Amino acid sequence: MRALRLGLNVDHVATLRNARGGLHPDPVAAAELAIACGVDGITAHLREDRRHIRDADLRRLRALPAPLNMEMAATEEMVAIACALRPHAACLVPERRAEVTTEGGLDAAGQSEALRPAIARLSAAGIRVSLFVDPDPAQLAAAAALGAPVVELHTGAYANGRAGERERLAAAARHAASLGLECHAGHGLNFDNVGPIAALPGVRELNIGHFLIGQAVFDGLGPVLARMRALMDAAREGGH
């Protein structure tokens, strides 16, 4: 198993498909190509309004020979769907109807009582639960207390250039390890900014979607994934 895994989010292949209707481009075909190119897993976010990924997409993605990470809000509807589908992992994220993309991390500390039954049900179904959180010690402590084995650190502020954010992420990755949590990261990562995050030894997985799908319009999905993989490996090996 790689020291640093790459997960591809295929949501925006579905966004493009849904803009015109019909079946093309198919997010499942994109996932199949990505798997053939060596990606370590596939992420898909089933939203309440089904603006991109649809229920049928998830069922087809679940049948592919790579781990499926289902991003989802901790609602009764989504928990029931996940428990029936049984993806490899479920990443709980905040979700607001009007947002263009997920904005900020989940408030695990403030919403622990609401999250606890969802995490318990998903875990009982054999699904590995992760919480998408800001790199904040209180959120990491809440995730550990709730029994989630994984946290995914929100890298949006880092990607937007906020000063000191890389150091904050590094400290959060170390703190997560001290709490026994596996640490992932994602949001806004691209060729130019992935290196400092990939270099963090405590981070085990990066989940990237919008940039990779967008860049694939120009360069093709295979070459884009290969370049991202090479940048990640170079950073992890000390080449960054």
Image (spheres, helix red, strand yellow):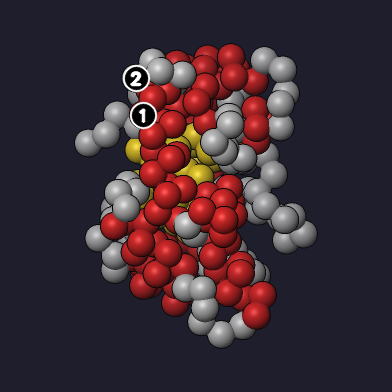
Amino acid type for the residue under numbered disc 1: Asp
From this view, report whether residue 235 is shown above or below residue 42. Answer: above
* Residue appearing at x 49%, y 34% in the figure: 185
The residue that label 2 is drawn on is 237
Task: Please provide percent x and percent y for residue 212.
Answer: 52, 49
Q: Which residue is mark 1?
A: 233
Outermost bottom residue: 22
Quadrant in the picture for residue 83: bottom left
In-front residue for pair 7/30 = 30
Q: How many marks?
A: 2
Name the residue type under label 2: Glu
Residue shown at 47%/73% (left/top)?
26
C-alpha distance separating marks 1 and 2: 6 Å
Q: Is residue 220 found left or right of 169 in the rendered image?
A: left
Label number found at residue 85: none
Q: Farthest residue toward the left?
A: 1
